[in-house]
Image (cartoon, grey):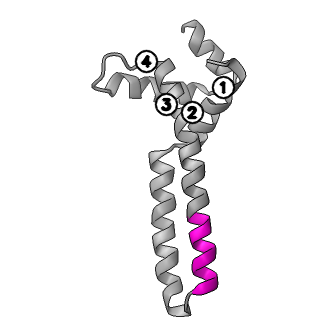
């Protein structure tokens, strides 16, 4: 285990998280993909996921307050799909850990 991985473990990442991240770096088609670049990318995705979730919440509030009861089911289905897309595109738990790691270490 190298120094960067040890720093990640000290800052909230688990061994399971590190295994997932290492698997992603091995399976990517770019040879320049490293654990450090993946952490930076995840920290950037965090704000995208937060903004996307916020937009979906605004749409949900608008839909609930301004729609007929017949349209409510379609709003919930569309919003559920939207939250699933955000959850899988931006792994929020890992991106939060990466964001806090970058903030604390000024990488």
How far is mark 3 from mark 2, CA to CA?
Answer: 5 Å
Q: Which of 54/7 is in front? A: 54
How far is mark 2 from mark 4, CA to CA?
Answer: 14 Å
Of all residues shown, which one is farthest toward the top? Answer: 2
Residue 96 in percent (x, y) is at: 63, 38
> What residue appears at the point 47 percent right and 26 percent down from the top-left corner?
38
How far is mark 3 from mark 1, CA to CA?
Answer: 12 Å
Badge 2 element: helix
Residue 27 in percent (x, y) is at: 32, 27
Disc 1 vs disc 2: Cβ atoms closer than 8 Å?
yes
Badge 3 element: helix
Check disc 1 and report the residue beneath it.
101
> What residue appears at the point 35 percent right and 16 percent down from the top-left corner?
32
Check disc 3 and report the residue beneath it.
41
Residue 66, above or below 48: below
Residue 21, above or below 87: above
Determine whether, in the image, residue 31 is placed left or right of residue 81: left
Instruction: Point out the stretch of residues depicted in magenta.
Output: 56-66
Q: Quadrant of the N terminus?
A: top right
Q: Earlier in the sequence, mark 1 or mark 4?
A: 4
Disc 3 vs disc 2: Cβ atoms closer than 8 Å?
yes
Depth-wise, is mark 3 or mark 4 nearer the camera? 3
> What residue appears at the point 51 percent right and 60 percent down from the top-left corner?
83
Query: Magenta stretch containing residue 51, yes or no?
Result: no
Check disc 4 and report the residue beneath it.
34
Q: Earlier in the sequence, mark 3 or mark 4?
A: 4
| Secondary structure, magenta segment, majority class | helix
Badge 4 element: loop
Q: Quadrant of the C terminus?
A: top right
Check disc 2 and report the residue beneath it.
43
Badge 1 element: helix
Q: Which of 54/94 is in front? A: 54
């Amino acid at each position: 285990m190298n120094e960067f991985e040890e720093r990640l473990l000290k800052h909230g990442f688990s061994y399971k998280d590190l295994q997932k991240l290492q698997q992603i770096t091995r399976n990517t088609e770019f040879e320049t993909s490293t654990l450090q670049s993946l952490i930076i990318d995840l920290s950037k995705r965090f704000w995208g996921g937060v903004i996307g979730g916020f937009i979906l919440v605004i749409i949900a509030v608008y839909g609930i307050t301004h729609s007929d009861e017949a349209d409510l089911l379609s709003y919930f289905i569309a919003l559920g799909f939207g939250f699933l897309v955000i959850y899988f595109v931006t792994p929020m738990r890992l991106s939060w850990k990466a964001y806090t790691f970058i903030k604390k270490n000024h990488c």
